[in-house]
Amino acid sequence: MVQIFRPGADTLARLALAALAVGPVLAVGLAYTLWRSPYATAQDVTREQPVPFSHEHHVGGLGIDCRYCHTSVEQAAFAGIPPTETCMSCHSQIWTNAPMLAPVRTSLAEGRPLVWRRVHTLPDYVYFNHSVHVAKGVGCATCHGPIQTMKLVRQAAPLTMGWCLDCHRDPAPNLRPREAVFDMAWTPPDDQDVQGARLAAAYHVKSPERLSECSICHR
Amino acid sequence: MPPLTPRLPELRRREALHLLAAGIAAAVGGCAKPDEEILPYVHQPEALLPGVPARYATTLSLAGWGRGAQGLAVDGRPIKIEGNPLHPASRGATDVFMEASVLDLYDPDRSRAVTERRSGIASWEMFGQAYARPLAEARARGGAGFRLLTGRVTSPSLQRQIAALRTAMPEAVWHVHEPLDEPRARAGAALAFGRPLRALPRLERAEIVVCLGADPLGPGPDQIRLAAGFMERRRDPARFGRLYVAEGLPTLSGIKADERRAVPPHGLPGLLVHLANGFGAGLPDPGLAEPERAFAEAIRLDLQAHRGRALVLAGEALAPDFHALAHWLNARLAAPVDWIAPPDPMPGDGPEDAPGDIAGLARDMEAGRVSCLAILGCNPVLTAPADLDLPGLIRRVGFSLHVGCHADESAGATHWHLPLAHELETWSDLRGPDGTASLVQPLVRPLYGGRSAHEILSLLAGEPARSGYAIVRETWSGQGGADSEGWWRRCLHDGVIPDSAAAPLTLPEPALPALPPLPGPPAAGLTLELTADPSLWDGRFANNAWLQECPRPITKQVWGNAVLLSHGEARRRGVEAGQMVSLTAGGRSLAVPVAVVSGVADGVAGLSLGYGRASAGRIGNGIGSDAYALATQAAPRLIRDVALTPLDDRRAVLRTQNYVEIAGETERLFRRIDLAALAGAEPKGVGADQPTLLAPWTGDADGHAWGMAIDTMACIGCNACVLACQSENNVPVVGPEEIARGRMMHWLRVDIYDAGKPERIEAGFQPVPCMHCEHAPCEPVCPVAASVHDGEGLNLQVYNRCLGTRFCEANCPYKVRRFNFFGYADGQEYASLGAEPVKAQRNPNVTVRARGVMEKCTYCVQRIASERQAAERDGRPMGAVATACQSACPTRAIRFGDLNAEGSAVAAARSDPRHYALMAELNTRPRTTYLAELRSPSPALSGDRP
């Protein structure tokens, strides 16, 4: 009598049963990985810009302070993107005919804004406030990474809610003295644990319970 | 992906699979972040902070009267209106019309182009060419045949321009038509004092107020000032006084009255004569029947005991002679009324240069004496008495033009239509009801290419083109002494011209007028009162969806009007609620549904104006029935002897609160105390002592505990808070179909509770936002923890967690949660509300909720957060936070604040003897609590009460 099942059928059946059990777990894992992957979070994605503005040159090389261009970072939720005239305050004197800067000159001449592509995007129901973070001693580099080395800006952190909460639940490791907030070369001291806790108390950083409440960021 | 609403044809299998595949593709693609752009300024304005609201003082008008406002603009987009505390007509508060004006600004149905009747869209240049000939002809004749028709003009600049136009063309005539004006009050004052005057009742000084058909607390240009003054005094129990109201239809004043009687309009003069006789008028006795006589006697005794602190107000239902009698009586009482010279020239005023009225214009058009007619900023084809046949007459005019924000009914009757810019887009100036001048400054450039009334009038006068700013600036040039520029900038900053209120006049004793015989009841029919609509006013706001969906204070009707009848009258005439009836008067008739309402006098019917419009726009067209069809020159507002014929069909009267009578229940839900019992009253706590299954309240993390106290005694039910909430919190409009399904979205509703009998309304208002319960029943039932508490006591709704089980809504005893059955704000907007310009109105600090998400009052968490963040940034303690509803309230009935803060008004309210919590027996421990309604019924009338 001919065997209906070949000897390998048992193995196949066992594999199928295992797949039934493991498959959903893997699928969830895959979805979760995809969701946290740079594809979804746009982490480390470098975006083309109308003018290849280099933070490496302006910040790292020339040492221009962040607040020279991002003027509202200490007063408002939005740090501010500089108006064309800020660019032209220097570039009407130097590199006046650089082809790279043609869009900037056109913008000023025609009164049309430059159209930048946004690099750091948060969902619409998240209300992040730059001014509070700056006042509490969170450095620019903490979230934006080593901007002074970026030829074109990329998003250094995943900007997921889990990533935000990591700090909101334990801010001390990420705090620095207020005067060092805009210092791109600052490195944490060896006793950052102690210093961070001291700064959290000095700057009245709210308790982790309070900082992880929904209404802190969502409205 | 198209919305899967039932309006779409049913999907076939293949289409469904296509959509499914597209959905999966979109979902995978949606994992990646969307490409967004940032557009910085080229030249950034100094002191502008991106994303931070900036406030500008400006002025908004109602019926021509200016009320000071502050416009909030984010990145150049006006998003919200608040009151200007320096302006006497708004006192920092708003009303529904002010709140809704910001939606009007973005209305995509506003007219966008100059149009000519035959060839359609034209341009300003083409109009200029076409207008050159009629203007030259009119000029050659000294202006003969040239007519200008406007609404009420209080603007000093516009008055100056009109005067200049009349100087240049002496034969030109200016006509004024303001549909909801008070011509009888004006004529009455002229009868009593021999000159046109405007009365400013000082309710803050009047303890006994008697309203005979008058509605000082009701909607209108002076509502905020009057209501604020009235309630300011009532907060002091020693000066509480008593409000007597006799009226045919229930009004807000009637609801707030201590003693109210439903009296048909023809019964009001008798009451007044009886009162006047008590002060030596010596008129023939009106022979009042018993219940009215006792009522009048009680009033008379109170008036006599409160000389200098008592006031009698007559309404438009009374003839001018009786207004004059009321003025005579007020003089006897030394009543707190200020008299000023009217800041607005109106027809019928004595002087030679007083404008003409619309009837005169119609006569002249009929006689062919009008060759060029300019209608500026009003809609006479809709609002003029029906027996004038204005559209037909306008067609006889050689050259006619209409200037307005919308291409409305009047635009359809004229040769040309010119778009008018919105008040938030123009420079101008306006005077308030007390004569205070204030400046109108634009918050944004004209969105749809309109021009201001000043610019257009300058064009019509044939002057070289000038900006509206230059015209307004010239009016005020030379003011302020040496530092004229500094003075101007200060006025712009404050919004108000200092010391510009009209000075109160000292007048001689008014003469006792010779009275006509008292009117009798109409022969057989009903007396029909045509009233201003609490939301649409005279119809000019018909295309505003917020106002259409704002429940009318007493009937709670939305999206339409209905003829109001008393229970007895409806029974007698064999009609029931929702049934269509035909109202016939003077050969004209109108089909309208019936609403049966408590407090309407027998023999009286009420109908509000402004509905049934043909050319309002996509929102307002065809909503309700046009009551102007019954108005005539002889009887513009009060029509005697209207025949009511029941029709066979029905039309649903959409109401957001059903009238229910629950024996005993009302008393528990709506606490009411008589003034005499106030001394013995005890504050009621927020909870019961019973144990609870809910997690215990763990206290407040930062020492803040937000709470709200609502004083129902001060609430006049005006709905300003409802619309303030709507505009602040991006609350969507659902439209009449959804309302008919019992769905609505207002985060704050104003309930009306009636403890009286069907024929004897004894009602009060109770605004109901979220209670932010410490033991919130909505929280334990949410399977995804979308309803949670924060450490400051706010009950939060986390939209991005919510998956729409609606368990929370079912478990909320206060029914304050609202569900997005469709994408009301997000892709499935009602009518034209999904248009791109409307989105610019939205508050960027509040999430726009998607379909399938629950939402509710947040205590304006964005305002709390803004203040908290500003305080954190500056290293200071948090200052006061005002919710949108609180800052809008004219009577300051809503108080919000920190229960833990020292000297906080909300904490103090909790120990007020009138304090109570809604459904305290449920032990939800609400953070929103109430102060009881307080009334002072007359002891002399105690036998007359049910």
Image (tube, helix red, strand yellow):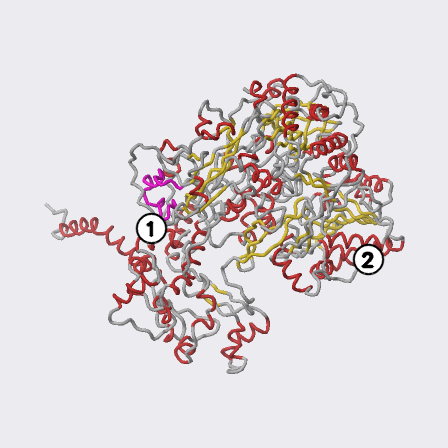
Q: What amino acid type should be assigned to the residue bearing mark 2?
A: Ala
- Determine the secondary structure under disc 1: loop
Seen in the picture, residue B504 relative to B257 is either above or below; the reply is below
Would residue B611 be found to the left or right of residue B885 on screen? right
Q: Nearer the viewer, residue B42 or B13?
A: B42
Residue B634 point in image, percent of width and height:
77, 31
Residue B549 point in image, percent of width and height:
55, 39
Would residue B4 be found to the left or right of residue B510 on screen? left
In the image, residue B650 lies in the stretch drawn in magenta: no
Viewer-side label of 2, 1: 1
N-term mark: 2 or 1:
2
Residue drawn at (50%, 67%) of the image:
A115
Quarter of the image for residue B561 reads: top right
Q: Which mark is residue B132?
A: 2
Q: Which secondary structure type mostly characterizes the magenta part of the structure?
A: loop
Quarter of the image for residue B625 reads: top right
Measured Cα–Cα span from mark 2 to mark 1: 72 Å
How many residues crowd mark 1 within 10 Å: few (<14), some (14–19), many (20+)? some
Residue drawn at (57%, 25%) of the image:
B938
Q: Nearer the viewer, residue A212 or A28?
A: A212
Seen in the picture, residue B876 relative to B888 is either above or below; the reply is below
Quarter of the image for residue B137 reads: bottom right
